[in-house]
Amino acid sequence: MFYVKERLNDTMEVSIEITDENVFCHCPMCGTEVPVDIAEILSDGESDLFGTAVFCDECGKKVRAGGRHYEHKQI
């Protein structure tokens, strides 16, 4: 089991199991929350969580239509 852990204060921390239903990111173009299938992202053996961007459907279509150039939105 993989999980994330966050210390809330000196006496409390929260651990949450990572599943195929609770991983999300923000689209780098529009900032929309996008569900992420970690198994699919990492299945090629070359991707990593730090160097991978997941676009929403609409922005993904724009990027595919116009090539790889896009403006990164700061969230």
Image (cartoon, rainbow, N blue to C red):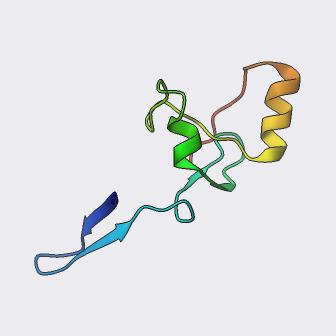
Question: Which residue is at a point 43% across and 35% down the rendered structure image?
Answer: 50
Residue 73 vs residue 9, the one in the foreground: 9
Task: Check the image and name the residue furthest to the bottom.
Answer: 11
Q: Position of residue 20 (x, y in %)?
A: 55, 59
Q: For the image shown, how many numbered marks are present on the structure?
A: 0
Q: How far from the left and from the top, in percent, is residue 69?
A: 73, 20
In the picture provided, is 22 more to the left or to the right than 57? left
Question: What residue is shown at x 52% (from left), y 58% (from top)?
Answer: 23
The reply, left or right, for residue 62 in relation to residue 74 is right
- Residue that lies at the very extreme toward the right in this rendered image: 65
Q: Residue at horizontal 47%, vertical 23%? A: 46
> How far from the left and from the top, in percent, is residue 62?
85, 32
Q: Is residue 74 left or right of residue 4?
A: right
Q: Is residue 36 above or below residue 14?
A: above
**Quadrant in which residue 7 is drawn:** bottom left
The image quadrant where one finds the N terminus is bottom left
The residue nearer to you, when weighing 59 against 16, is: 16
- Asked if 63 appears above or below 28 in the picture, the reply is above
Q: Quadrant of residue 61?
A: top right
**Residue 11 percent across, percent down from the top left:** 12, 81
What residue is rendered at 69% in x and 30% in y? 71
Q: Is residue 31 above or below residue 48?
A: below
Q: Which image quadrant for residue 68?
A: top right
